[in-house]
Image (cartoon, rainbow, N blue to C red):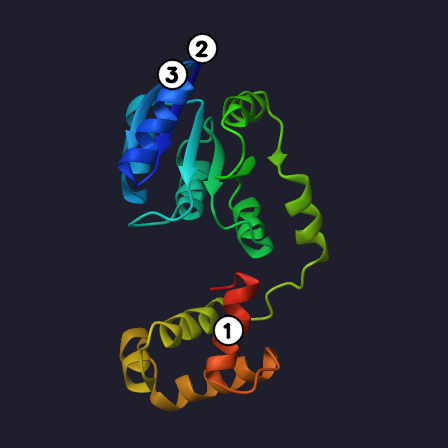
Amino acid sequence: MIRVLLAEDLHLIRGALASLLGLEPDIEVVAEAADGDAVLPAALAHRPDVAVLDVQMPGIDGIEAAAVLRDRVPGCRVLVLTQLGRPEVLRRALAAGVQGFMLKDAPPADLAAAVRRVHAGETVVDPALAAATIAARANPLSPREVEVLRRAAGGDDLPEIAAALHLTRGTVRNYLGAIVTKLDARNRLDAVRIATEAGWL
């Protein structure tokens, strides 16, 4: 029996996925989590074979949760589900040790098959997305630059970004200038657009 931990913040979707997997004779959902912070405690308590994690959740996201599981529960393999079929998201997931990456619009029958394949030690990634990732431009921004731009995209002004990240206003201004240059953007708003479309934010 393959023991599964299911993490998804939307109750209706989580319930549907649990019911779907529950129909399989060789799969048992042993734990559920409604946010990223609940993933590790659930995994430590139930020791699942496979964790099926949504990428976008409250608390830490599914990819961060996968990295925590890799370090703290190494016997648990991870399959992430996402609506974000973008190369940068796949790169982050693979870097975090994820063994499976599946889009939420895949046929329902594919989920159980992906769980079995991940449990068997295979890496499961949509071929079209894998090809797009190989061809896509890598993120030229540093993690700090991404953080600065993400706050700018959220509407924070320069003093707010400086205060939140414990930087001087001049340093934030320098970061924003470097970001615009690296992305060959016209201005800060254009940089946000470019980074968002590329999946870097």
Q: CA distance from mark 1 to mark 3?
A: 41 Å
Mark nearer the N terminus (2 vs 1):
2
How many residues crowd around disc 2 within 10 Å: few (fewer than 14), some, or many (20 or more)? few
Q: CA distance from mark 2 to mark 1?
A: 46 Å
In the orientation shown, which residue stands out farthest toward the bottom?
A: 170
In the orientation shown, which residue stands out farthest toward the top?
A: 25
Q: Which residue is mark 3?
A: 22
* Image quarter of residue 165: bottom left
**Above or below, comparing residue 190 to residue 200 in the picture:** below
Q: Looking at the picture, which amino acid does disc 2 mark?
A: Met
- Helix, strand or loop at label 1? It is helix
Q: Looking at the picture, which amino acid does disc 3 mark?
A: Gly
- Helix, strand or loop at label 3? It is helix
Q: Nearer the viewer, residue 35 or 132?
A: 132
Answer left or right for 134 relative to 163.
right
Q: Looking at the picture, which amino acid does disc 1 mark?
A: Arg
**Above or below, comparing residue 80 to residue 46 in the picture:** below
Answer left or right for 184 relative to 22.
right
Rendered location of residue 102, percent (x, y):
53, 38
Rendered location of residue 174, percent (x, y):
47, 87
Q: Which residue is mark 2?
A: 1
Rendered location of residue 16, percent (x, y):
35, 28
Disc number lying in front (2 or 1) = 1
Q: CA distance from mark 3 to mark 2?
A: 11 Å
**Above or below, comparing residue 37 to residue 19 in the picture:** below
How many residues crowd around disc 1 within 10 Å: few (fewer than 14), some, or many (20 or more)? some
Name the residue at 30% across, 25% down.
31
Mark nearer the N terminus (3 vs 2):
2
Q: How many marks?
A: 3
Q: Which mark is residue 193?
A: 1
